[in-house]
Amino acid sequence: MTELTTLDGAVVLVTGANGGLGREFVHQALDRGAAKVYATARTPQSWTDARIVPLALDVTDATSVAEAAGVAIDVTVLVNNAGAFNGSSVTGDLVAAKALFDTNFWGQLEVTNAFTPILAANGGGAVVNVLSVLSWLAIGDAYSATKAALWSATNTQRLALAGQGTHVLGLHLGYTDTPMTKDVEAEKNDPADVVRAAYDGLLTGELEVLADDVSRRVKAGLAAPLRALYPQLG
Ligand SMILES: NC(=O)c1ccc[n+]([C@@H]2O[C@H](COP(=O)([O-])OP(=O)(O)OC[C@H]3O[C@@H](n4cnc5c(N)ncnc54)[C@H](OP(=O)(O)O)[C@@H]3O)[C@@H](O)[C@H]2O)c1
C-alpha cells in the first residue's frame, strides 16, 4: 500500500461540507497543501477560494451520489463527514430511526462505494469516516446504533480496500462545538482540534483517531463489565 504522508497536491472531497466539522475539513485540507477540495452539500454554498469546488451531494439520494462521482473523478481523499441527529429511538416506532440510518449509515456506504473505483484509479488514496464516541456507547439511542454500524463497516472497508491501496481511517469524537450540538450544555471540543487530530492521524498512518479523552476512556472501557460502562444499570 502506498502510504499517504501528505495532502500536498491531494484532491479531497468532503461530504456535509457546510457543517461545523465539514468547513474545518475543507479549510485544513487546503492549509496542508491540497490542490482542490470538493465542498459537497445538499445545498452547496459559494466559497471565496478558487481551490474549493462546491458540488451538490445528498448522501441519501443515489442519483445525487452517482452524479457527484461522475464529476469528481480526480478525488484522492474522501471525507465521509455528513451526518445527522434526529432524536430517534431503536425502541418503538422505527420510521425516524430508519431515516437516520439512511443518512448516517447507508448514505456513507453509498458514497464510499461510488468513489472506490475513483480512489483506485488515482493511486489508492484514503477514506476518512467520521464516527463518534457513541459508536461505543448506546446512550445516543438510534444515533449510537448508526455510528456503531458505521464503525463495523469502517473496519470491513479497511480490509476490503487494502488490496487497492486505499487507507481507511475511523474518527471518534465526543461533543464538539458545531450546529449539531447547539442545544447541548456541556464541555465541547473545538472542531479545529478534532480535524487537526484527524488529518495528523491520517498522515501518520493511523487506522483510528480518538480525538478526545472521552473517546479514549470509553473505548478503553469496552473490555470492562457492562455495568461499569452503564452505571444506570445499577
Ligand atoms: N458535533 C458533535 O458533537 C459530533 C460528535 C460526534 C460525531 N459527530 C459527527 O460529525 C459529523 C459532522 O457533524 P457536525 O458536528 O459538523 O454537525 P453539523 O454542523 O450539523 O454538520 C452536519 C452536516 O451534515 C450534512 N448532512 C446531513 N444530512 C445530509 C445528507 N443527506 N446529505 C449530505 N449532507 C448531509 C448537513 O447538511 P445540511 O447543512 O444540508 O443540513 C451538515 O452540513 C457527523 O457525522 C456527526 O454525526 C459530531
Image (cartoon, helix red, strand yellow):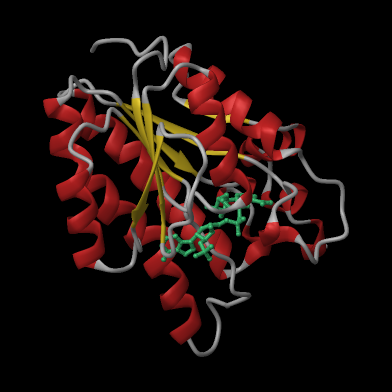
Q: Quadrant of residue 41?
A: bottom left
User: How many dots with numbers?
Assistant: 0
Q: In this rendering, is residue 42 above or below 72?
A: below
Residue 230's x, y, as percent? 74, 56
- The x, y position of residue 98, in whole percent, is 41, 76
Specify the quarter for ligand 1: bottom right
Against 117, residue 199 (above or below) is above
- In percent of the image, x 44 and y 64: which residue is there? 43
Q: Residue furthest bottom?
A: 93
Q: Which quadrant of the view contains residue 215?
A: top right
Can you say whether 44 is above or below 74 in the image? below
Q: Residue at x 62, y 37 (%)?
A: 223
Q: Is residue 184 toward the left or the right of residue 15 in the image?
A: right
Q: In this rendered view, identify the residue nearer to me: 157 or 40.
A: 40
Residue lying at 59% horizontally and 37% vertically, measured from the top left: 24
- Residue 135 can be seen, yes or no: yes
Which quadrant: the N terminus?
top left
Of the pair 155 and 225, the residue shown nearer to us:
155
Tell me, yes or no, if residue 220 can be seen here: no
**Percent coordinates x, y for residue 76 in the rendering:** 28, 27
- Horizontal and vertical percent position of residue 69: 20, 48
Rendering quarter of residue 142: bottom right
Q: Looking at the rendering, in which quadrant would you find the C terminus?
A: bottom right
